[in-house]
Image (cartoon, helix red, strand yellow):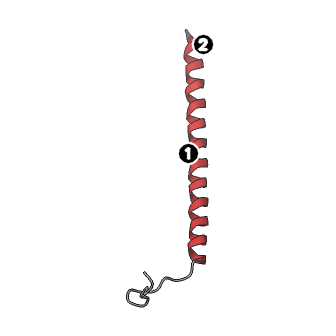
């Protein structure tokens, strides 16, 4: 009986640690992707303002 309780506690602790690791890894990945996207957006040319560009060939 005591071994079962100890085993269940160890499994719960292991599952909690695994979940925390996965969440940390996911947050880090999302932060890296956000920084990459911001860098790519910074490389785009500026868009013309409203009324600055008229497409006469459309």
Q: Residue at x 60, y 71 (%)?
A: 40
What residue is shown at x 56% (from left), y 73% (from top)?
A: 41
Packing grade of label 1 (10 A; few <14, some 14-19, many >=20) is few
x then y, percent, for residue 3 = 60, 13
Of helix, strand and loop, which one carries label 1? helix
Q: Which mark is residue 38?
A: none
Residue, x 57% and y 59% (percent of image)? Answer: 31
> To which residue does mark 2 refer?
3
Q: Residues within 10 Å of mark 2 (few under 14, many from 20)?
A: few
Please tell me in which quadrant of the rendered image residue 8 appears: top right
In the displayed structure image, the side of residue 51 where residue 40 appears, left or right: right
Residue 42 lies, in percent from the top left, at 58, 76
- 45 versus 24 height, above or below: below
Residue 54 drawn at (x, y percent):
41, 88
For the residues labelled 1 and 2, the Cα–Cα distance comes to 30 Å
Provide the residue designation for mark 1: 23
């Amino acid at each position: 009986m005591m071994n079962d309780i100890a085993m269940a506690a160890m499994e719960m602790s292991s599952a909690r640690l695994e979940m925390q690791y996965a969440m940390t890894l996911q947050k880090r990945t999302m932060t890296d992707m956000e920084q990459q996207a911001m860098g790519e957006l910074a490389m785009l040319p500026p868009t013309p303002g409203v009324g600055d560009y008229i497409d006469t060939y459309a």
